[in-house]
Each structure stands twice: as structure tokens, then as C-alpha cells.
Image (spheres, rainbow, N blue to C red):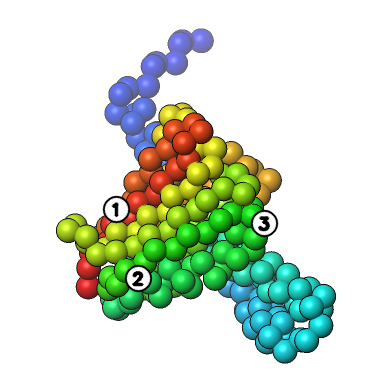
Amino acid sequence: MPDRPEPSELERRLAEAEARAEHAERLATVGRLLAGVVHEINNPLTAVTMYADALAAGLADAAAREKAEAILEAGQRIQRLSRELVSYVRPRREPDGTHELSTLVDEGLRLCRSELKGSSARLERDVAPAAVRGKRESLVQVVVALVANATAAGEGHRIRVTAAAGADGAVLTVADEGSGMGSEVLDRAFEPFFTTRPAERLGLGLCTARAIVERHGGRVTLASAPGNGTTATVVLPLA
């Protein structure tokens, strides 16, 4: 039986292109399925968080109020994970709108209450006026991702959140005094699904935050070293 001829370079490239196309189609299918599942989860979850918030505000008994707040915080955590997944699998062009950065920061910190409480972090806030353009929900998600990442750096450490108008635009920083990251971890920090805490995180927070910032015409950087904490810096165009 004659030997089968070796495939040509053109044939190899064609086979690789076909494999990439099939892989992309599978990812697109998974993305559509995931977006639909998340949408179906969010509809009843919105009612859960809304009523839990109202219930917590109306309860006089401290123990009962704490349970209602726990339900609210758990629901908000699921909503944040859902937003991360949808933003990753179905990115979209961000519509324009003008927002005060301090308001976005405060809303993000409110959504991070459970993480801040769980880590016993000492939060410091120093926010000056700065107006930015973009979608409010997406920009709040950036704040949430950075603060949640800072709370995961340890327990009882200080987290300092600052925002102000600078020469290059509106500058938001989230700095923690946690354990910090070595160069190998830092190099992969923005990689999708990369996390050093797989039981607690999806590994999409920083990746999604960077994608949102870049869609708004900004940039985000990380500076970190073992034992010296981590500082995340976001620069967004001023409105």
C-alpha cells in the first residue's frame, strides 16, 4: 500500500482554520445558552433582592433584620456573578451618558458590603468630583470588581478607594494592604477564568472590568508585589 503523502502547508493551514472556526462556533453557542440562563435567573432574583431590601428596612428585630440582609447580600452576589458572565460572553458597545464618579463609587461600595464585612477590611474613601461618560451599570461593575478583588487579598487590612479628575482623565484607584501578588500571578491577573481562589471566584472580575474600561476609551493597570498589597488604577475620559 503506498504511503499517504504529507499534507501541504496550505492544507495544514486550512485544517487549523477549520478547527478554529468550529471552536468559535461552539463558544458562541455556549455564550448564547449562558446568556439565556442568566436572563432567566435574574428575573426572579430581582424580586428576591427587592423584597429582601424592603423587608430588612422594615424589621425592628435585629436578628430578623440581619437574616433579611444576608438574603439581600447573597442575591446581590449572584447578580454580580451574572453580570460578569454576560459581559464576558456578550460584550456590547457602551451607550453614552454622563455620571458623577463619586456616585458610581458609592453604589459599587454598597454592593460590596458583604465582601467588605466578610474580610473585616478597613475601608477608606477619598473621592473628589469628576464626571465621566458611559453606562452607569457597567462602570459600577468595574468598581465592584476592583473592590471585591481587594477584599480577597486578606483579612483585616486597609482598602483605600480614591477618585479625582487628573490631567489624563478621571482617575479611580483601589489600593489594598493585603498579601500582594508575585510576577507570575500578576501577569495572568486579567486572564479569563484565572483565579487563585477557585472555590470563591469565577476569575472573570478583572477581565470583565478591563474590557468595560477599554470600551469606554480608558485603561486599567495593576501594581503589586508580595507582602506590599495591590493597587488597581483606572483612567477614564472626562465628560
Estimate the x, y position of residue 7 in percent, counting from the top left. Answer: 37, 21
Q: Residue furthest left?
A: 167
Q: Which residue lies at the image location 49% right of the left edge and 31% below the top edge?
A: 226
Per the rendering, the mark at residue 101 is 2
Query: Where is mark 1, residue-wise?
Result: 219
Per the rendering, the mark at residue 10 is none
Estimate the x, y position of residue 230 in percent, counting from the top left. Answer: 45, 43
The residue type indicated by label 2 comes to: Leu
Tell me: residue 232, above or below residue 110: above
Estimate the x, y position of residue 118 in percent, counting from the top left. Answer: 67, 56
218 vs 91, nearest the viewer: 218
Work out whether mark 1 precedes mark 3 in sequence or the reverse, and give the earlier one. 3
> Which mark lies nearer to you, 1 or 2?
2
Q: CA distance from mark 2 to mark 3?
A: 26 Å
The residue type indicated by label 1 comes to: Arg
Res 170 seen here: yes
